[in-house]
Image: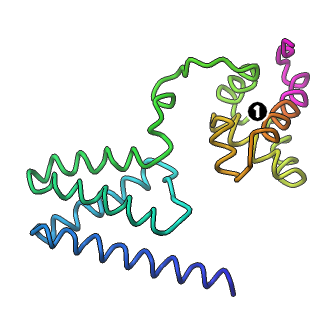
Amino acid sequence: MGKYKQIISSLIFNIAETILIFLVGKILGLETNNIIIVMLCFMISRGFFGKSLHFKTWYRCLIWSLLILLSLFMILKIDLRVSILFTIFSAFIMTGRSNINDMYLWSGKVSKYDALKDFVSVSPNHPILLEHEEYWRKNYPVRYDIFKLYFRENKTYQEIAEIKGFDDNTIIKRESATIYSILERPLGLPPIQK
């Protein structure tokens, strides 16, 4: 019952937010079809770029959505094409992919687990990796999530702590060390320098 209540309240909020944003565009004197183009372009682009950022509270979501679309509507008053370009850029910013470290191949940081990260990026479907990953998924869900987020998706400890709702990164550090030690010998990884 609680799940359906959450779905219904989320649906009502999203509809109300969409109507409110649309009305802001109308108040600015924009054409209906242009408002719809910008709104659809923003939503589709966010979905295309990957996992979107979400706020934990409804009012922060509403405020940021209104501010972002208001700025896009202001640009729309100048030119539709420029507004669409900024809409796509804004959608990209609203995903986790906008981090400068994700734009190029080197982040500038060195991790003692880089050997395993490199192995995962080069051989993501290696049978040993898949076997351990499946075992962790069934038996150690926290370890599985940390493996997926840290070694496969290259998230930082801080990002993982936020995603998982951890108070600090102690669990992440411990699990990363355990994961590396489990896979070190079967994958022929270099031992970690102490």
Query: Which residue is denoted by mark 1 in the rendering?
Result: 126
Q: Is residue 126 above or below residue 95?
A: above
Residue 21 percent coordinates (x, y): 28, 70
Comparing 56 with 89, the one in front is 56
Rendering quarter of residue 158 = top right
Q: Nearer the viewer, residue 99 or 88?
A: 99
Q: Position of residue 95 (x, y in %)?
A: 46, 47
Q: Looking at the figure, which quarter contains the C terminus?
A: top right
User: In the figure, 127 relative to 143: above or below?
Assistant: above
Q: Is residue 190 above or below residue 166?
A: above
**Circle 1: residue type:** His
At 65% from the left and 28% from the top, the residue drawn is 121
In this rendering, position of residue 170 left or right of residue 42 = right
Q: Residue at x 69, y 87 (%)?
A: 1
Residue 12, position in %: x, y? 45, 82
- In magenta, the rendered stretch is 180-194
